[in-house]
Amino acid sequence: MSKSKSVGILGCGWLGKPLSIELQKSFSVECFSRENTLDNSSFWQSDIVIIAIHTKENYLDTVQKIATLTNSASDIILMSSISVYREFDEDVDESALITKGSLMKEAEDLLLAQRKRVLILRLGGLMGSDRVAGVWKSATAFSDGFVNYIHRDDVIAIINKILHVEVNSGIYNLVAPNHPTRLEIHQKNSKKHNKEIGAFEGFSKRRVLAKKIIDELGYDFSYPNPLEFWD
């Protein structure tokens, strides 16, 4: 794919900004905030539109505008979430039949119903850099269970590869392949950062599997084990 391909990223935050910096090495990239998008016609004409915003401030209205106003030939990539699998307490992949609605699932369905070239990326818990599990939150009570985290660097690398091989439709889980427990991670990080460990109860057996992205994209995770995200 040539650098003449334009990429418009909606959301210039913790993920969107470094993503834009990486993609600029190969593509013509602009990063837009939710506030200035409507005033920039270049966003609506982007060859590839990446939605990387929080589910707040009329989220569905924003997604609907993108579905309606972007060029009909544009590829749309939605940064979704594994929260769509909240009803499951077992191993789960993209083939799961989701029966409990959520705002994120509504956004997925909206785009899939109105556009042909839609790629849904269901991201696990975003970690890495200054996001340290068990340290960066002020909460002191936690539910234990298998974690479904992904390092930000892997998300950026996967999207970069997706654009280069021109995958423009489908649903993929983006989750590190290893699933240690939340307690294991907090114990390690609390010791490393000299923090008090919180209280744990319960146990979630849900493991969100990312075999599809590994098999179809041939992607090799740089950070396969969340226990080693901050080493």
Image (cartoon, helix red, strand yellow):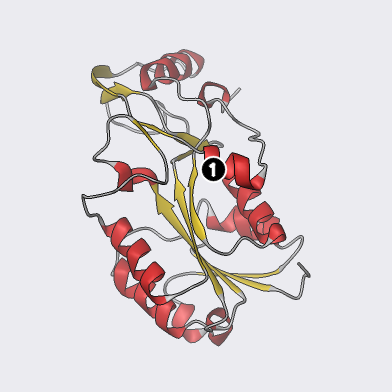
As drawn, 23 above or below 148: below
As drawn, 194 above or below 204: above
| Number of numbered discs | 1
- The quadrant in which the C terminus is found is top right
45 to the left or right of 139? right
> Is residue 151 something that shows in the picture?
no
As drawn, 94 above or below 75: above
As drawn, 82 above or below 183: below
Residue at 41 percent of width and 54 percent of height: 80
The image quarter containing residue 7 is bottom right
Residue labelled with disc 1: 212
197 to the left or right of 2? left
* Percent position of residue 91, x then y: 37, 31
204 to the left or right of 173? left
Residue at 64 percent of width and 47 percent of height: 217
Residue at 57 percent of width and 81 percent of height: 73
Q: Secondary structure at mark 1?
A: helix
The image quarter containing residue 87 is top left
Residue at 38 percent of width and 44 percent of height: 82
Q: Amino acid at mark 1?
A: Lys
* Percent position of residue 137, x then y: 35, 33
Query: Which of these two is toward me, 178 or 14?
Result: 178
* Percent position of residue 60, x then y: 30, 69
Query: Which of these two is toward me, 53 or 131?
Result: 53
Label 1 crowd (10 A; few <14 / some 14-19 / many >=20): some
- The quadrant in which the N terminus is found is bottom right
> Is residue 17 something that shows in the picture?
yes
